[in-house]
Amino acid sequence: MILAPLSDPLLRFAVCRAALPEEDVLCQDSEIAEALALGYPRLGVLAPMEEHPWKNAILSSGVPVLVLGTLETELARPVPGWTGVAVREIDTSVYGLRRLMAEAGSPPGWVDGVLVDLSRMCGFPLPYEFRGFVRRLLEFPARYNKLEAMGAVAELSTGALKARFRRRGLPSPFGYLSWLRVVAATRVLADPSITTVEAAFRLGYTSNGNFCRSIQAVSGLTTTDLRSPEGRNRVLSEFVTYYLTPDVRDRWASLSGLFRRVA
């Protein structure tokens, strides 16, 4: 997930083209505010000469920041929080900007770690459509807490999304969503200072009780179980067993363009 509070439509377009095809690029104030509070953005992209109400919040949040400056901008004295600089006149080509965004956003975050672990456990590269489904939900679990939100990415109603999966012989998208919300819970609960009430809010559950019951119903584990590395590994292992078997690889790949941007 990229936070890009940019007013210049050409800069927004450049960032969207350079971002991973499987991730969201958020430009609206309300989306950025919610993502800073409840999500896990991997990078912010700012223009130093533009004033924006959430610019300082991004800089102070600890999210890696790439600054899109101009040749006239004083870039020799970056403000605290910058992790990379791109010059608009030179670096806004797709491949140049993509490289700089990757460098500024490194090292890979926890979502990338989950994707690597899932690929290792199932024994094959993850299809792009599957990666798009996973990355969006894990980076912003409060936003993608219902199938309606994931359907909106694919520009499909919930019923049409379920039908698309059914026609390809895939398990229900609701099953994927439910298990991935448990995976997201392992990340939140790994912090021992986070209560289950706080975790439920961050993950988009309606209440603490609903959160605990849902986790147990889906995984058979308690929220206490999820706080340990062993609990996380068990969740990933069972998710792979039920939902990432070799026969689903080509079926996910057949959902071409559903959960990623296609140039």
Image (cartoon, helix red, strand yellow):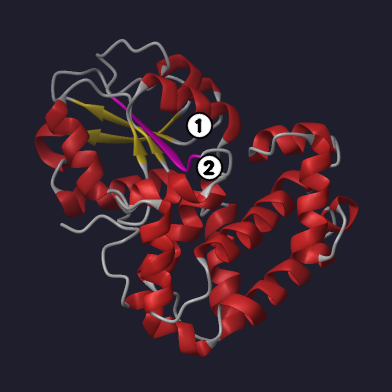
Q: Which residue is mark 1?
A: 35
The residue most toward the bottom is 247
User: Of 153 and 55, which appears nearest the observer?
Assistant: 153
Q: Pointer 2 and pointer 1: residues touching (CB < 8 Å)?
A: yes
Work out whether mark 2 precedes mark 1 in sequence or the reverse, and give the earlier one: 1
Q: Which residue is mark 2?
A: 140
Q: Is 153 on the left or on the right of 233, as rendered?
A: left
The 10 Å Cα crowd at callout 2, few under 14, some 14 to 19, many 20 or more, is: many
Tell me where residue 199 appears, x and y as whole percent. Answer: 75, 38
Note whether 153 is above or below 236 in the view shown. above
Tell me where residue 54 appears, x and y as whole percent. Answer: 43, 16
Q: Residue at x 63, y 37 (%)?
A: 204
Q: Quadrant of the N terminus?
A: top left
Name the image quarter holding residue 243: bottom right
| Residue 184 seen in the figure | yes
Q: Is 201 on the left or on the right of 92, as rendered?
A: right
Q: What whole-number distance in Å separates the C-alpha atoms at marks 2 and 1?
A: 7 Å
User: Of 176 and 141, which appears nearest the observer?
Assistant: 176
Q: Residue at x 84, y 40 (%)?
A: 209
Note whether 252 is above or below 54 in the view shown. below
Q: Does residue 43 show up magenta in the picture?
A: yes
Q: Residue at x 32, y 71 (%)?
A: 255
Tell me where residue 171 appears, x and y as whole percent. Answer: 53, 74
Helix, strand or loop: magenta stretch: strand
Q: Does residue 18 show up magenta in the picture?
A: no
Q: Magenta stretch: give its range.
A: 41-46
Note whether 56 is above or below 240 in the view shown. above
User: Of 52 and 141, which appears nearest the observer?
Assistant: 141
- The secondary element bearing badge 1 is classed as helix
Q: Residue at x 30, y 56 (%)?
A: 21
- The secondary element bearing badge 2 is classed as loop
